[in-house]
Image (cartoon, grey):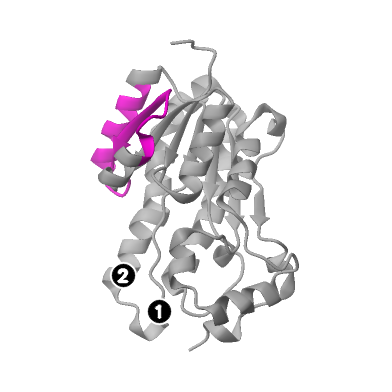
Amino acid sequence: MNNKKRVALITGAARGIGLATTKLLLAEGAFVAMVDIDKDELDKASNGLKDVQAIHCDISNPDAVAAMMAEVESKFDGIDCLVNNAGVADFGPIEQTSFEAWRRVMATNLDGVFLCSQAAIPALKHNKGCIVNIASISGLRASTLRTAYGTSKAAVIQLTQQQAAELGEFGIRANCVAPGPVRTKLAMAVHTQDIIDAYHDAIPLNRYGSENEIAELIVFLCSRKASYITGQVVAADGGFESTGVGLPSLRV
């Protein structure tokens, strides 16, 4: 392999923002380790893509993460960019959020980011690499029905800043992307027309974002063009954060 090519490791790479980011990085000539817990979807997404390594992994499991990281480093001889994109959601009122649901969200959204970042640090130190964590607008502003999800994403934002503060001396940059409403297949499957209309009314750009638009920001933060940017949280949300809290259509 050409060791001058960058190596990116992307979790949650089988669909959505993770897959869009994978394709953009491949187009720029990077090698990509595609990591996902859904093996069938991962195999389907990676089929036909060159310069990728698909790895089935539960990122909430420390042993699985250690094995995954060892496999990536063995295959590519290092890591330049870690994109912690994998996440799960469980929406519902506080009173109806079980501890099992709370732990399931935290295990992937927060523990997974911590474990993958920690495991990648030695390789990132060697290459003066970068970390891009994917949070959510729900981590920046409160909303109903998002007790576990919003809290996990707020914690990811804080973790990003901790990473930037501690790892900067090693040349490692850490930044966070907080997407607003994005037109994913999952979102469109569960958002009623009433919710879609309410989001459009609340977003200054009057539309949902696309997976590719979020991926473009991630790729920029991974690039050398962002070489002096670290510890930042960028809301890619069409201006949603600027418009206040809450949507009547999302309240119980």
- Quadrant of residue 149 in the image? bottom left
Q: Secondary structure at mark 1?
A: loop
Q: Residue 195 at x, y = what percent? A: 56, 78
Q: Rounded to the nearest whole Å, what is the CA distance between mark 2 and mark 1?
A: 10 Å
**Residue occupying image coordinates x 69% and y 30%:** 227
Q: Residue 4 at x, y = what percent? A: 54, 13
Q: Is residue 88 above or below residue 43?
A: below
What number is the disc on residue 160? none
Q: Residues within 10 Å of mark 2 (few under 14, many from 20)?
A: some
**Residue occupying image coordinates x 44% and y 38%:** 10
Span shown in magenta:
45-73
**Residue to which mark 1 is pinned:** 92
Nearest the viewer among 18 and 66 is: 18
**Residue to which mark 2 is pinned:** 101
Check residue 69 for magenta coloring. Answer: yes
Q: Is residue 37 above or below residue 147?
A: above
**Residue occupying image coordinates x 71% and y 68%:** 206
> The N terminus is located in which quarter?
top left
- Quadrant of residue 73 in the image? top left
Kindly indicate whether the residue at mark 1 contacts the one at mark 2 (C-beta within 8 angstroms): yes
